[in-house]
Amino acid sequence: MNRQSIIVLIGLLFTLFLSLTLPEIAYSGETLSVQGMGRGGMRGGRMMGGDGRIIHQLFANHDQIRRTVEEIPGGVRTVTESDNPQVAALIKEHVPRMYQRIENGQGIPMIMMSSTLPTMAQNPDLYHRQFEMTSKGIMVTETSNDPDMVAVIREHAREVTGFVKVGMPGMMDGMMR
């Protein structure tokens, strides 16, 4: 079995484990602005529910997603969209769920796939998170007055762009770091 097959197999098993063991989080609304609420971490030994399904489907359909990243003073503005209505709906569901988790101090699912998510989840008071739905996805603005957090925000934007470009192998590379 070659390296890529092993990476894909590990990713699928990990996603299956998470989807079977984690709770759902409900969210409704079109806009959310969160400033410094909650702390990252697990509650009750569980990290996520439908989030695993969403993330897995986004990775599986990464080739149907387009993403732009603009560096702005103190952070980034990203636009992530798809012409496929089902994929666009997943994109629109994913970001509010992640911000809700941060707001509620629930931690971030699949945090080990990213070098930046642990810092972002543990320091929600150091940056401002805001999003706006577009017709085909979502526009996100993340900013901070802390230069170190600005660097983390920008690196996270690059990580997510990498996930969009290569899908599951990008996630697995992050997990193996």
Image (tube, helix red, strand yellow):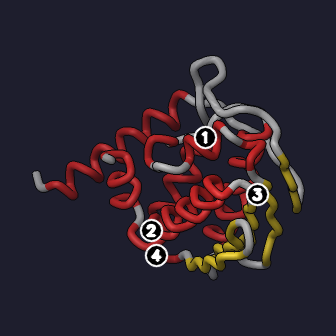
Q: Nearer the viewer, mark 4 or mark 3?
A: 3
Occupied quadrant, residue 10: top left
Mark 3–mark 1 Cα distance, whole angstroms, equals 23 Å
Q: Is residue 76 above or below residue 53?
A: below
Q: Which residue is mark 1?
A: 108
Mark 2–mark 4 Cα distance, whole angstroms, equals 12 Å
Q: Tag 4 or tag 1, which sits nearer the N-term? A: 4
> How far across and how far down the image is residue 14, in percent?
39, 39
Q: Residues within 10 Å of mark 3 (few under 14, many from 20)?
A: few
Q: Nearer the viewer, residue 32 or 77?
A: 77
Q: Nearer the viewer, mark 1 or mark 4?
A: 1
Q: Which residue is mark 4?
A: 63
Looking at the image, which residue is at 41% across and 64% down? 167
Looking at the image, which residue is at 61% across and 54% down? 148
Does 82 sit left or right of 73 as displayed?
left
Q: Which residue is mark 3?
A: 145
Mark 2–mark 1 Cα distance, whole angstroms, equals 18 Å
Q: Tag 3 or tag 2, which sits nearer the N-term? A: 3
> How far across and how far down the image is residue 96, in percent?
76, 53
Q: Which residue is mark 2?
A: 162
> How far across and how far down the image is residue 83, in percent?
63, 82
Occupied quadrant, residue 145: bottom right
Q: Nearer the viewer, mark 2 or mark 4?
A: 2
Mark 4–mark 3 Cα distance, whole angstroms, equals 34 Å
> How far across and how far down the image is residue 95, in percent?
70, 56
Q: Is residue 21 above or below residue 130?
A: above
